[in-house]
Structures are given as structure tokens and as C-alpha cells.
Amino acid sequence: TSPETFFALIGGEPTFRKLVAEFYRGIAADPVLRPMYPEADLGPATERMTLFLMQYWGGPNTYSQQRGHPRLRMRHAPFRIGPAERDAWLGHMRQAVDSIDLPPDQAATLWDYLERAAYFMVNTMDDI
Ligand code: HEM
């Protein structure tokens, strides 16, 4: 990985590990989202999300070595993601982004992406 990536800029792997660990602490306690996760242990899901985000921002491509092309919309198709699920997901992610104390411009870059990605993942409007 080259040093000028956003991955490197915000602190590399430890930053992403902290971000996603914090996010999944929120998921673990969420009455709406927790039941959507098929596995009893959130550890493997935590690892997949961490590796995906590291790769997305220019870090090692371990995610695709293990999982292939991300195809995230397709991978989320089995789950019913409406506006309520999206907003709950974003609430935990907002808390996680705040927990890593990035400079405001870096936090905004990360957040803008996560917010757009969460809107993109919505696959039902049955909530509204
Ligand atoms: C997987 C829910 C948005 C990235 C999953 C899983 C669930 C889920 C239930 C299965 C757990 C697993 O096997 O890993 C949701 C909900 C969302 C959302 C409710 C609300 C909008 C996003 C967004 C991203 C993302 C915005 C990326 C920025 C991932 C990744 C995986 C995953 C990388 C693992 C894919 C794999 O390799 O199998 N998500 N997700 N998710 N999600 Fe989401």
C-alpha cells in the first residue's frame, strides 16, 4: 500500500479496526439490526467489514482475496433494508466515526461515503 492513500492518512489498519469494532458494538445492542445478522458470533462479520473498508480506501486487498468482488448490493439482497434499517445502521456508524477522532475534513470524507453507500444499499421501501 502506498503512503498517500486515505487508508494510510487516517492511520491504517488500527483505525479501521477501531472504527468497525465500535460499529459492531452498536449492532450487537440493536433490537432491529442484530436479528438480521445470520451468525451468532459477530466476529466474522466484523472482520469482513473491516477488510472491505480497508481495501476500499486503498489498503491491502485482503477482502477480495478472501471474498472476491464486493458486489455489496447483491450480497445485501437477502436482507430487508428499508429506510428504518438504513437509518439505524447509519446511527451506529456515526457513533463509530465520532469515536475515532479524525480531523473534521477526514471525518467528513469517510462519512460522506458511508452515508451514500447506506442509501445505495436500501432494497425496499415497504417501511414508508
Ligand atoms: C454484510 C446489513 C449497509 C458492507 C452484511 C450483513 C448484514 C448487513 C445483515 C451480513 C453479515 C455478514 O455476513 O457479514 C446491513 C444493513 C445495512 C448495510 C442493515 C444498512 C444500510 C452496508 C454498507 C456497507 C456494508 C453501507 C459498506 C459501506 C458490508 C460488508 C458485508 C456486509 C462488506 C460482508 C459482505 C461479504 O463479504 O459477505 N450487511 N448492511 N453494509 N455488509 Fe452490510
Image (tube, rainbow, N blue to C red):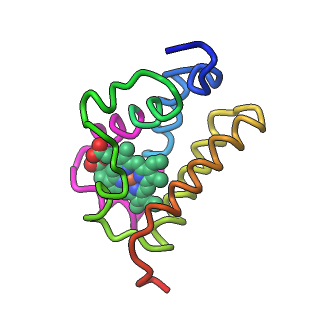
- In x, y percent, where is residue 79? 30, 65
The number of numbered badges drawn on the structure is: 0
In this rendering, would 16 be left or right of 78? right
- Magenta includes 80? no
In this rendering, would 118 be left or right of 28? right
In front here: 41 or 71?
Answer: 71
In this rendering, would 76 be left or right of 1? left
- In x, y percent, where is residue 13? 49, 22
Q: Which residue lies most toward the right here?
A: 104
Residue 100, relative to residue 24: is it above or below?
A: above
- In x, y percent, where is residue 27? 42, 53
- In x, y percent, where is residue 105? 77, 37
Residue drawn at x 63%, y 38% as measured from the top left? 99
Q: Which residues are magenta?
A: 26-50
In front here: 52 or 36?
Answer: 52
Residue drawn at x 65%, y 50% as measured from the top left? 112
Residue drawn at x 51%, y 30% as measured from the top left? 16
Residue 120, relative to residue 99: is it above or below?
A: below
Q: Is residue 29 visible?
A: no
In front here: 46 or 2?
Answer: 2
Q: Is residue 86 visible?
A: yes
Give the quarter of the image for residue 91.
Answer: bottom right
Residue drawn at x 65%, y 21% as measured from the top left? 9
Give the quarter of the image for residue 8.
Answer: top right
Residue 25, relative to residue 34: is it above or below?
A: above
Residue 83, relative to residue 26: is it above or below?
A: below
- Magenta includes 36? yes
